């Protein structure tokens, strides 16, 4: 279902429309929707606020925060959100990519496949787990291989939708490598689909972004052949 189909569904309340929108996992833009004041306060302040609110959520659910096993959870969640799983929201955490001269004149396709990917669905805040495969053709410079993993990780460490993720990774690779010849494929399982909702444990979602040379069928076929 397309976004405008959802928005044009008659007879639904605003809340029902929003629920439908989330269940269909529709992205509203290619940039992560961030507030203008997103980084006006420090990480420490963010952790204090999140910890306080998460405590309220747990209390509302009826949990006893005096229990030894639970009392540290709000702070742990806050730290995990800010310092780990959503750390990629902060542009300062973007990996600095060192480029090397392509001394071997390697001008063929370079493919890094099966990059482990952990992200989080922005509609449900539960994990998206999968693999990313990236390819590029050198414009004269090459990047350290581990940097490809780090770029994938950076954009994954945000509340995400899988349609947006390959585009964000591809845009970064294009900028860093100074070439349009990049390809990104992501194959991932969404826990919001497998562990709840329709509870489908067998499906995975594949999204891709191709540009430059990779728009040619022969190049794309070559890239996809390496992934098999
Ligand atoms: Zn979801």
Image (cartoon, rainbow, N blue to C red):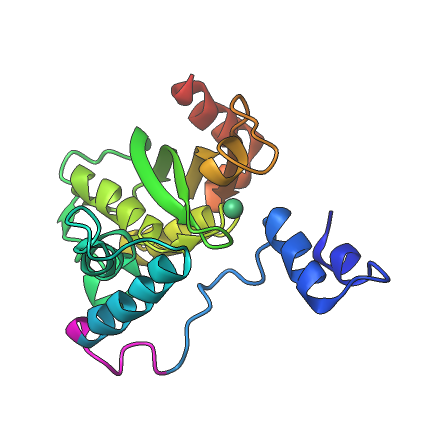
110 or 170: nearer the viewer: 170
16 or 53: nearer the viewer: 53
169 or 153: nearer the viewer: 153
In this picture, residue 12 sits left or right of residue 107 = right
Figure disc tally: 0
In this picture, residue 137 sits left or right of residue 189 = left
Q: Quadrant of the C terminus?
A: top left
Q: Which residue appears farthest toward the top when viewing the image?
A: 228
Q: Which residue appears farthest toward the right when viewing the image?
A: 10
Looking at the image, which residue is at 50% across and 40% down? 192
Looking at the image, which residue is at 39% across and 20% down? 226
Residue 76: x %, y % from top left: 19, 55
Residue 141: x %, y % from top left: 22, 47
User: In the rendered structure, does residue 38 fall within the stretch colored magenta?
Assistant: yes
Is residue 112 visible to us here? no
Residue 201: x %, y % from top left: 51, 24
Is residue 98 shown above or below 193? Answer: below
Is residue 56 shown above or below 155? Answer: below
User: In the rendered structure, does residue 163 fall within the stretch colored magenta?
Assistant: no
* Quarter of the figure with residue 32: bottom left
* Quarter of the figure with residue 80: bottom left
Looking at the image, which residue is at 39% across and 82% down? 36
* Prevailing secondary structure of the magenta residues: loop
Is residue 5 shown above or below 139? Answer: below
Residue 207: x %, y % from top left: 52, 39
Magenta stretch?
37-44
137 or 166: nearer the viewer: 166
In this picture, residue 171 sits left or right of residue 50 = right
Is residue 190 visible to us here? yes
């Amino acid at each position: 279902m397309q976004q405008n189909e959802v928005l044009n569904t008659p007879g639904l309340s605003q809340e029902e429309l929003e629920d439908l929108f989330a269940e269909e996992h529709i992205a509203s833009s290619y940039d992560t929707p961030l507030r203008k004041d997103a980084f006006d306060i420090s990480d420490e302040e963010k952790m204090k606020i999140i910890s306080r609110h998460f405590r309220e959520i747990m209390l509302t659910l009826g949990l006893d925060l005096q229990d030894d096993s639970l009392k540290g959870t709000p702070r742990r969640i806050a730290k995990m959100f800010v310092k780990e799983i959503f750390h990629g929201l902060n542009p300062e955490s973007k990996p600095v990519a060192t480029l090397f001269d392509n001394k071997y004149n390697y001008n063929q396709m370079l493919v890094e496949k099966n990059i482990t990917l952990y992200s989080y669905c922005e509609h449900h805040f539960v994990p998206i787990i999968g693999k990313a495969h990236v390819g590029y053709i050198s414009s004269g410079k090459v990047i350290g291989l581990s940097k490809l993993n780090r770029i994938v990780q950076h954009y994954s460490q945000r509340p995400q939708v899988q349609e947006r993720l390959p585009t964000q990774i591809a845009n970064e690779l294009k900028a860093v490598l100074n070439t349009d010849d990049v390809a990104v494929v992501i194959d991932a399982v969404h826990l919001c689909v497998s562990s709840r909702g329709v509870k489908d444990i067998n499906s995975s979602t594949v999204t891709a972004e191709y540009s430059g040379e990779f728009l040619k069928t022969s190049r794309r076929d070559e890239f996809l052949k390496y992934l098999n």
